[in-house]
Every structure is written in C-alpha cells, then in structure tokens.
Image (tube, helix red, strand yellow):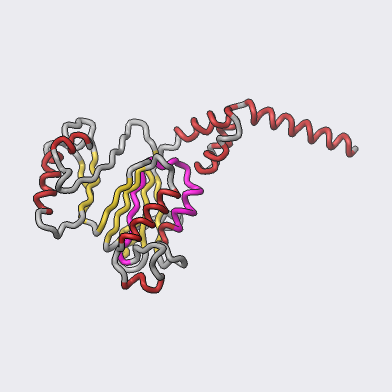
Amino acid sequence: MDGEGASSSAAVDSKAGFVLGNVAEVVEKILSYVPTKSVLRIASVCRLWRNCARRVLRTRQKTTWLSASESSRYEEHVLLRTMEEGLENVFLLPQMVMVMMDQEHFAGQYSSFRHKKARRCQPEDKVYVEDKLRRMLPRNCDILCIITPGIVLTPSEPACRIPQEFMEGEAGFSLLFPAMEGVHIRPFHFCKKSLTDDALEKAGLSGNPDLKVVLLFGYNAYKTGASRFLNQLLKPLGQSNVLIAGGHVERAFPQARD
C-alpha cells in the first residue's frame, strides 16, 4: 500500500511539473495572483515563466498609491518604512513615482528621532531619502520627492478611504505610475538658467499636441523673480488646452532614472 501511495504521489507531481513547465495559460493564471516583486523573482525560473511574467506585467497598468501617517518607531520618515513594506505587495511595476512628505518630520538617518521637530531640512536628509528610494524602486524608475508644510492624503487601507488633512504630525504618500499604453509621463525640472524655449519644447511642454495634463510644483517662491519665472513657464501652456495642477511647495528634488 505504501508503495502504491508513493507511486501515485510521484505521478501527480510529475503531471503538475509538466503543466507548470509547458502550459503558459496555467502559469499566467497563477502569476496573475502574485505581487509584482515576486513575479520578477519567479521570472528567473525558466524561459516559459519569464515570458509569462512579461505578459502578466504588461497587463498591470492601474495606478495605485501608498500612504502613511502618525509617528514612526524608526529614525526615518514613516512613509519610507510603509513603502518598503508595501512595495512587496503591489500589483504593478512603477515607472514613475511621486513622493510627498511633510516638512516638519522630513529627516534622515543623521537625525535624532526626538529632535525631528526642531530641525529643518538638511542636505544629508535629501541624500538619504534619495538613496533609500532608489534602492526600493526599479532602476529605470523616475522619482520626484516633494516636501510640503502639510499633507492631504487618502489612506491606502481599503477600510478607510476618506481623505485626511495633516497640518501637524508625520504623514506622506507616494503615487505609483506603471507603464501604460497610450500614456507617456515625462518629468522635467527648470531653474532660471535652464528655462528656455528649446528646453520647454524638449520637455514636451511647448508645441506638443499630445500634451493633456501638467503637474507643476514650484519652490523658492519667495526669491526675487519667482513670479516672472512662473509666468514664463505658464505662458506656452496657456496657449493650449492643457489641464494644469500643482502649487508651491517647500522643496522638490527630482531624480532621473539610471
């Protein structure tokens, strides 16, 4: 009896192995229930699984977000920890990520947790956050990190999807944009010296009939010439039927893909 049971089990395993190694439809169905990071790891099993993983990833074109609030138990911002954990379970491969954190608690590994409220943004914080985000996200992902005095976010937990405002306390969110058919996201960054007609055209902000939406965030608005700079940037956009959204923020530092 034991011999028959072992033989039957081996036969089942053999059939399952044959199906998983040869039937693409079954493999794709299984991978459709697996988070993206795990799919990328699984893709190295064999050529069939790699091709199935590629097809599954192409179907994941829905934008999602991760958000966090309240105090972190760690010395880094609570959003960074939430992203590190949440990115393991999302069902998309980010091509562009926009991160927004509150200014009051924006701090990196060089800060003491109990001194966060007394600190302003320091250069080492920027370097730490950029490095942390780059290690968490794909190499070919564009990153835009924005620091603001307050945060309005929608909790990413399904149980509570009511927008919340945080003028005090630790809060932040990240928007994750995958590669989407028919949608092209082009990040840009201008200062007084780099804002020219050629630069606007190269960024797709001028003479681009396919341009539909522009997210625009300005900082250092208190400096002399800021209004003139903004008007120079908005002038070509005002000549086309483009939706413009955004505002003034405390800081912004884009990071282009490798």
Residue farthest along the right direction in this orientation:
1
Question: In which quadrant will I find the C terminus?
Answer: top left
| Number of disc labels | 0
Residue 89 part of the magenta-drawn span: yes
Q: Position of residue 151 (x, y in %)?
A: 31, 60
Classify residue 106 by image quadrant: bottom left
> Percent position (x, y) of residue 202?
21, 34
User: Would you identify the image quadrant in which residue 20 lies?
Assistant: top right
**Position of 168 relative to 239 (above/below):** below
| Residue at (13% x, 37% y) in the render | 197
The quadrant of the image that shows the N terminus is: top right
Q: Residue drawn at (18%, 57%), measured in percent from left and top?
A: 220
Residue 134 lies, with reference to residue 202, above or below; the image says: below
Task: Examine the structure image and report whether residue 253 is included in the region drawn in magenta.
Answer: no
* Residue extending furthest toward the top: 22
Query: Residue 11 placed where, x, y %?
Result: 78, 31
- Residue 154 seen anywhere in this rendered image of the structure: no
Q: Is residue 220 left or right of residue 142?
A: left
Relative to 18, is 222 on the left or the right? left
Q: Which residues are magenta?
A: 81-104
Question: In the image, what residue occupies the spot 49% across and 31% down?
Answer: 54
Q: Is residue 258 left or right of residue 206?
A: right
State the image coordinates of residue 111 (x, y, percent, origin top left): 38, 67
Along the line of sight, the residue nearer the viewer: 178 or 222: 222
Q: Is residue 203 visible?
A: yes
Q: Nearer the viewer, residue 161 or 11?
A: 11
Residue at the (54%, 43%) spot, across then down = 38
Say which quarter of the image contains residue 208: top left
Answer above or below: position of 190 versus 81: above
